[in-house]
Image (tube, coloured by chain):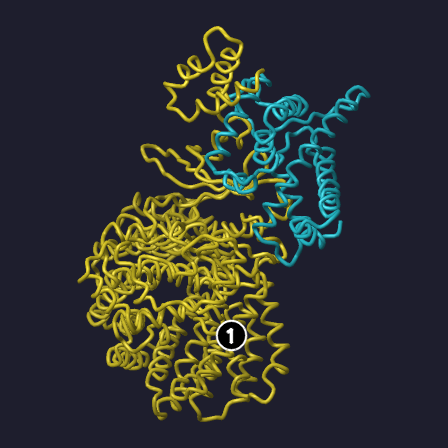
Amino acid sequence: MDTRALALLEEALNRPPPEREDFLRERAGSGTALLADALALLRAHQASEGLLEPRRLPERLGPWRLVEQVGAGGMGEVYRVERVDGDFTQRAALKLVALGVGGRDAVARFHAERRFLAQLEHPNVARRIDGGTAPDGRPYVVLEYVDGDPIDEWCQRRQLPPRARVQLFRQVLAAVDAAHRALILHRDLKPANILVTRDGQAKLLDFGIAKRLDADAGLTGAGNAPLTPQFASPEQLEGRPLTTASDVYSLGLVLHLLLTGRLPAQHEEERPPGQALASLQRRPTTRPSAALAPDRLHLGRREAQAWRRQLAGDLDRILLKALAPDIDRRYASVPEFADDLARWLDLRPVSARHGERSYRLRLFLRRNRLAAAAGTAAVLALALGLAAAAHQARIARAEAARASSANAFLMRLIADADPVASGRTPTLREALDRAVDWIPQHFRGQPDSEADVRLGIGRAYTSLNLLDAAAAQFQRALDLRRPGTPEHAEVRQAQALLDWSLGRTDRAESGYRDALAVLAAAPYQARAAGQVRNDLAALLNDLGRFDEAVPLAAAAVEEARGMALGPAVLGARLENLGGALHGAGRLAEAEAVYREAIAALQQALPERTVALAVALNNFALVARDAGRSEEALALFERAVQVREQAFGPDHAELAGPLTNAARLHAELGRTAAARQAIGRALALADQAFAPDYIGRGHVHLVAAQVALAEGRHAAAADHAGQALAVFERADFASPELKTRARALADQARDEARGRPAAP
Amino acid sequence: MPTGPITQLLRARAAGEDGAEARLAELVYAELHRLADRQMRGERGGHSLTPTALLHEAWLRLRPEDGAGAADRAAFLGLAARRMRQVLVDHARRRDADKRGGGAWKVTLSNLPDEAAPDPQIDVLDLEQALQQLEAHDARKARVVELRYFGGLEMVEVAQLLGVSRATAQRDWEVARAFLHLHLG
């Protein structure tokens, strides 16, 4: 082989393919050995495509056909895949972890991540659809395939004004917030990972996966080398530990890009991490309104002026706070960031979150009996609890500072505990235990701060179901606060929720009543009082004391209206009132209230998706009791749809409305429809519900009814038996439920023997 | 294997410090050998192995706890690519020796597309021979193969390490591949 042949090929490759051969003939001269070599190389060039390149696709994994590789990194590969199911083709994205890299640890981490994703169900996060193991032992995860454009392009293509951009961006915040509550830091937030679908839904991609697939995210948690330096926070560039505030910074960069058409000057170019860091520290961020790049946003001079006016002031301040290089000056959490944007958007002086705290926690605690891991709620409780503390403390700035120092203390603890290393619940619990140990030295001589932190930790323990530990912290917090003060009442309220979840409803009720007495008499505590009234009404609903619940719930609703607490809070309180009215037999009033609740909750989507589904389901029960079966069925169906949209077709949350619908179908004699609905519910319940979760019993009870109506006696007896087994182990199963299960089992046996059912 | 010194060595080498390169090479070489040994002797012996996976694992093991940056990683992979090549050749030679002595396990390289090559597995020693021939013609092109195939570097990283444009690196890669295809054929 002549070395010149290589040089000739190299030159030929600069030309379009059809001209290459002629070029070689011209340059090498016909008949020469050089030409022969060069032509052989040219042919080899075509044939060598893919040689020594990464491995070809496997044909399929599980039910998924691999269509094309769309990405690859050190720790794995990403493919576009399809599943053909009848006439319907489902598209998805499949991520395959690399094996041998990091060995067993990488696989263990991947599995942990997959569990997190399963728990991270949010309408703005690309959903996990499936997972499995490839024949070669590599685990994979299948994610929703998002057909959309990166958020910056999406906005640009539609020439959205600033307001609409901020509104869209709030969906992104909601998604990141959900992840943080699941203890997942995204760490690679950038427009390419935020797609917006044609109908305007933002979807966050690469959640957690990106972080785990990144080789530099080692087991120890050390090494935070950013995947995308342009969108990295200063601490990420420095390799220091990351917190939720680090994601806040990256989100700030994305919003800056959306609102000004560019990144802050020090982020504009891609540089080696060291240099970027130096310039971050040296140069303060320019006010975004002054950094506006009209040409990149395709704005005329007039329009640019209008944009600048909109950015100047609040939006400038919000962005500069999100982009503060110093972590302590930044928003500590996504909700704080989101709240400020919400205030800018609608000029309402309130954060919708505050009044909702205990309602959410309660809802969670209920759902949590689905044997789900409890970690999510712990951070949720921390964040919400302390946000509330900050809110009330607005009366005095010093107290606000105190609350935020408590908040920072706890958030740091949570961030320090790597949730992936040892599985989530134990890690979080360890973090909390450690916090408790540290409190004495950390807050010596600061009883107010100590009480704040103990209250927050107690709430976190509550949601982890570590109720004794929670009770101890609440008691310490209570002792640190002065009786008769709103702060004291706040702890009483937290204790009441704990008592309630332990079934000590007498103590819960007196706790709420004490708190209410203090709050109702204190100045500036109307919001807190309304919240306690709402909680107390919900407790009374649980106890079946609907007549007492109605006035309390009604007062809470009026307070929400009067203080314009927003549709999320109002909807939740209306839902409570509807339940009380329904229980009290005031069906017409209940119906009107539910209609309003549903309208309000629809305005609060996607945040209030679960509450909306609950309201639809409960409204359906009212319609059923009013004898309007068709309407009830339609409402159950809508409840199912809302949950399907939010969680996908095979989420356990669907089991409730499906079961209700099945029961109604059965009562109407529509056995086919009943069997279909209950079949779906059974599949979900058996897979997702703990053996002692009462919901599982309900599903089997209705399954027994349906089977009996169809004359399938053996199946009916089996389901009734399973229902009874659940009820005997469940916490809150009433004697009536057990009696009904037994009666159904007897009836099935009797009918099977050809005897008439016992009366 | 101590995990501390690699970054210091990488930086010492970048600063042109005497002996840093040799010590670094020794460290990397030992670690790669250890990994390759384990992989080939273990339960998965007989399976094909991916050079980049091995290198990645080596990096994970050698990289210090205090967080080395992306530039360190690229420098490491650039250096380790050549060692990787050595390791694989050493193992292949031992394989042949073992075969003669009755031991039977096979080392092949993966990452080869089924469609392009009827026999998807290229023997390490054949590849080494072709690569040496390429080196004689054009050392930089052989180095591109080393970095890309044995080091698993992205084209952009290859270009940066060699101080050429991405387009040039890409052309080098294509010409080298054509050459190798011809000589492996």
Q: Give the residue at the far top of this rendering.
A: A31
The chain drawn in cyan is: B
User: As rendered, which of A3 and A43 lies closer to the eye?
Assistant: A3
Give above or below for A701 relative to A383.
above
Residue linked to disc 1: A408
The quadrant of the rendering that contains the C terminus of chain A is: bottom left
- Where A44 falls versus A616 (above or below)? above
The quadrant in which residue A620 appears is bottom left
Q: Left or right: where does residue A191 sit relative to residue B3?
A: left
Residue A54: x and y in percent read 53, 32
Under mark 1, the amino acid is Ala
* Residue drawn where x is 39% and y is 24% of the image: A15
Residue, far right: B101
Label 1 element class: helix
Whether residue A757 is visible here, answered yes or no, is: no
Mark 1 closeness class: few <14, some 14–19, many ≥20 residues within 10 Å: some
